[in-house]
Each structure stands twice: as structure tokens, then as C-alpha cells.
């Protein structure tokens, strides 16, 4: 498929045909952020939720100074929880430390678990150690996916203090929780992490055992560098 010019993309984004608009948005992949963002903005309020979702994701990977405020506005005001969750996720891609307050608020105040899940993942992506308290609280969530997100994020922010709290998931019935734990422990160099990973290495689920093996290798390499 030949790449379209900016003018062609711009025209196609106004097509009444959804497929045309989606193809045009996909064509922005190879366009610089400064050229792409004004065009992405044309479809941020599109009638198609799928296209809006693609546009919001695009703002996260085509960062300009404007993207942050656009995503914050969507996260705080959009009536659709899926779109709010997309905005929370895109803020994580931006990796902007200013997003800490906004994501924290979304985690505490949004009524939908999907938005809270996205906020927790993004708090890990922006690697802000201030997220400690929120993520520890998320470990007690009734939603297993929120527990998974919190465990992963605590690993991402290399929160050594959280090791005792996350170790209680070593015997979770959910293998994905155990896998997330093994992955997180690989970022948390403590003697307890090593013991837990040796235990998880014997897990009867291949993915968990493999994640534990990789985690032990990472910790060993960190130790060698120390």
C-alpha cells in the first residue's frame, strides 16, 4: 500500500466511510508527531468509538507538547469508560511525570475498573515511585486484573518496599497473577525475591516457571554488576 500524502490523509479523515478514516489514521504511523497530531485531532470526537480509541492511542505514541493536555481532558471528562481507559493508557506511553496526579485521581475516583486498571498500568509505565501507596492499595482490589496491574507496576517502579506485600500472591489460584509476580520480583533485588522466585520456578504452569527463571537470571546479573 502506497503511503498517502498529508493532504490525502487529511481529506480521507473526513470521508463518510469509516474504513477510509481508519486507513488514513493508520497511515499517520510514518508521519512526524508535529504533522500527525493536528490530523489525529480531526477524529478525536468521531462517531466511531473504535476510531476514537485508535486516535487516542496515536496521541500516546506521537508525543507533542499538546498531547498531554488533550489526553488529560479526555480522561477527566469523556462519558465513555473505554475511551477514558484508552486516555489513561496513552498517558502511560507519554511517560510524563505530570501524569502522576491525574492517573492517581483516576485510580481513586473513576467508577469503572477498566479505567482504574489502565491508570495502575500507566503509573508503572511512568515509573514514578510516588505511586507506592496507590499500588499497595490496588493489591486489595476485588478485581484480579487490578491486582495483576498493581503487581506489575510495583515491579516497574522497582518498589523494594513492596516485596513483603506482593509475596502473598505466590500461591494465588490465578497463574497470571503468579506470572506477574515472578516478572515483578525480577526487578526487585532482595533475598526474599530470590527465595520466592526459586519457589515459583517449580510452578506447574510453564509461563510462571519460565518467568521465574528469567527473573532469577535478571537478579543474578544485577548482583554481578553491583
Image: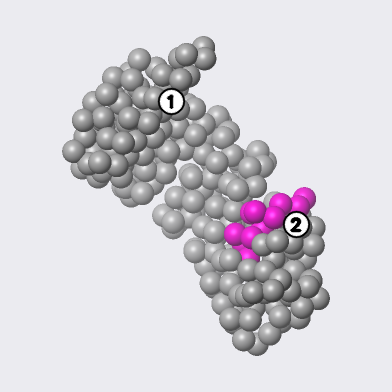
Tell me residue 27's x, y (percent).
67, 69
How many residues crowd around disc 1 within 10 Å: few (fewer than 14), some, or many (20 or more)? some
Residue 150: image tag: none
**Residue occupying image coordinates x 77% and y 65%:** 38
Q: At numbered mark 1, what does the secondary structure look like: helix, strand or loop?
A: helix
Tell me residue 162's x, y (percent).
41, 26
Colour pattern of the rendering = one colour
Of badges 1 and 2, the one in the foreground is 1
Q: Which residue is mark 1?
A: 218
**1 or 2: tag closer to the N-terminus:** 2
Q: Nearer the viewer, residue 45 or 219?
A: 219
Q: At numbered mark 2, what does the secondary structure look like: helix, strand or loop?
A: helix
**Residue occupying image coordinates x 37% and y 31%:** 214
Tell me residue 215's x, y (percent).
38, 29
- Residue 27 shows in the view: yes
> For the magenta stretch, what is the residue range?
55-65
Q: Which residue is mark 2?
A: 33
Q: Is residue 128 above or below residue 111?
A: above
Amino acid at each position: 500500500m502506497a503511503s498517502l500524502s498529508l493532504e490525502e490523509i487529511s481529506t480521507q479523515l473526513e470521508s463518510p466511510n469509516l474504513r477510509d478514516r481508519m486507513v488514513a489514521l493508520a497511515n499517520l504511523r510514518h508521519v512526524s508527531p508535529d504533522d500527525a497530531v493536528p490530523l489525529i485531532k480531526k477524529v478525536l470526537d468521531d462517531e466511531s468509538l473504535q476510531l476514537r480509541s485508535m486516535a487516542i492511542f496515536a496521541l500516546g505514541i506521537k508525543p507533542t507538547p499538546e498531547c498531554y493536555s488533550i489526553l488529560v481532558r479526555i480522561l477527566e471528562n469523556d462519558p465513555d469508560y473505554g475511551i477514558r481507559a484508552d486516555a489513561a493508557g496513552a498517558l502511560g506511553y507519554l511517560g510524563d511525570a505530570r501524569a502522576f496526579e491525574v492517573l492517581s485521581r483516576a485510580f481513586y475516583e473513576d467508577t469503572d475498573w477498566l479505567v482504574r486498571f489502565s491508570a495502575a498500568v500507566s503509573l508503572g509505565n511512568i515509573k514514578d515511585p510516588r505511586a507506592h501507596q496507590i499500588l499497595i492499595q490496588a493489591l486489595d482490589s476485588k478485581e484480579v486484573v487490578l491486582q495483576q496491574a498493581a503487581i506489575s507496576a510495583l515491579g516497574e517502579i522497582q518498589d523494594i518496599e513492596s516485596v513483603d506485600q506482593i509475596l502473598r500472591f505466590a500461591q494465588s489460584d490465578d497463574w497470571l497473577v503468579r506470572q506477574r509476580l515472578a516478572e515483578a520480583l525480577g526487578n526487585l533485588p532482595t533475598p526474599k525475591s530470590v527465595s520466592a522466585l526459586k519457589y515459583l520456578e517449580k510452578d506447574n504452569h510453564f509461563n510462571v516457571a519460565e518467568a521465574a527463571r528469567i527473573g532469577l537470571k535478571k537478579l543474578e546479573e544485577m548482583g554481578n554488576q553491583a
